[in-house]
Amino acid sequence: MVLIVISMAMFANYYVYDSIAPIADILKSDLGFTDANIGTLYSVYSIAAVIVLLLGGVIIDKYGTVKSTIFFAAICTFAGILNAVSSDFTVMLVARFLLGIGSEPLIVAITTALAKWFKGKELSFAFGINLTIARMGSVSADWSPTWAKFAYDGWQGPLIIAAVIGVLVLISALAYGALEKTASRRYELGRAGETDKLVLSDFFRFSRSFWFVVLLCVTFYSAIFPFRSFAIKFFIDSWELTRQVAGQYNSVLPLAAMIATPLFGLLVDKIGKRALFMAFGAFLLMPVYLMMAYHVAPLWVPIIMMGVAFSLIPAVMWPSVAYIVEERRLGTAYAVMTLIQQIGVAGMNWTIGRTNDVFNASAANPMGYAPGMWIFSILGFLALFFAIMLRREETGPNAHGLETITVSSSKS
């Protein structure tokens, strides 16, 4: 019950975050927003996340998972409501900033709560279920032009739906608090470990392999998430798809990740070759943007390639850090990765929006999207380069076992 309740908070949180993409073109036509404005709505979320990451998990460690979850959930719910009530760009920016302030520590608080409830049990399974339910929020937002078609006559209807769903974040957090209070009277719950924090002195103790993983992380996610920010608008303008079909295509990435990421994780644990798999994922990602920009293949071909890459690289990349970094520095390592990832995503969301504006990307000028797609392709190339450098490092004398450690070898 606890797993479902707190996962529903993540579901609603993901939905609110992804509620902008399906109305990007409506914000432009109804409110006069530019693509740079739309990119900035995503960028301020990431900037807020960076600020929270720099502060660390102090609030969660001090006040506990229940109070922290409710507090950050309330911020997320308020942000969703604020985003729907005003057409003023500044108000929307404040709402998205607050969403970033609430969402990132909420995710940390929920992760900490899961560790407290499931430690020593099926923790990996619990994390998997939690992430699957959360990503359904992204899928639901992408599909909202289909199941909530009635709301898409203007910009406000879809955001009102997002605000209503956003209330579920707070309801779920309150329900979790009630469940934990009841359970603590009857059972002895596990203690949650400390949250991940940045320890500046650890920066200089990380190996080259770790920094190659960080560089792969930031280039990969900077090519994926900002693309999703504008994908529905791009599909409508360049491929002449309906909003419903465009949203369904955009949902392929989170759907693929829900299904394939655990399977890729099992495969890599069995055969090793982690850096090689990351290089293969980056290789798949590199051409997809130009394939879409220049219509060199049916749209489903690059979308499937991107879905494989989006499932494969995270399945390998995040667990690989545990092989490269000492356990006592893992918190700093993951905090550094997430921090740099958010900086990259923030910068790229604005950059792509501004590029679209400069080249007048629109239904009347679909090739105006091509320069932005070239930027994404360059990021894909850089991701491939860093993956190759990682493999080179991991097949040399300073290897950490990314290419060789398997489930069978660890048992022997």
Image: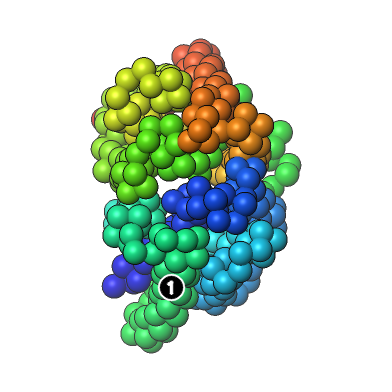
Left/right of residue 388 with respect to residue 353 in the rendered view: left
Front residue of this view, candidates 116 and 145: 145
Please provide percent x and percent y for residue 311: 35, 36
Location of residue 146 by image quarter: bottom left
Which image quarter holds the N terminus? bottom left
- Residue sticking out furthest to the front: 364
Front residue of this view, candidates 10 and 404: 10
Q: Is residue 223 visible?
A: no
Please provide percent x and percent y for residue 15: 43, 59
Picture colour scheme? rainbow
Above or below residue 203? Residue 28 is: below
The 10 Å Cα crowd at callout 1, few under 14, some 14 to 19, many 20 or more, is: some
Please provide percent x and percent y for residue 287: 43, 19
Front residue of this view, candidates 102 and 301: 301
Left/right of residue 58 with respect to residue 289 in the rendered view: right
Left/right of residue 106 with respect to residue 348 in the rendered view: left
Q: Residue at x 54, y 68 (%)?
A: 84
Give the residue type at disc 1.
Answer: Val
**How many discs mark residues in the rendered view?**
1
Q: Circle 1 is placed at which residue position?
A: 164
Which image quarter holds the C terminus? top left
Location of residue 145 by image quarter: bottom left
Please provide percent x and percent y for residue 267: 27, 31
Secondary structure beneath label 1: helix
Location of residue 95 by image quarter: bottom right
Q: Residue at x 34, y 44 (%)?
A: 242
Above or below residue 293? Residue 118 is: below
Q: Residue at x 51, y 25 (%)?
A: 367
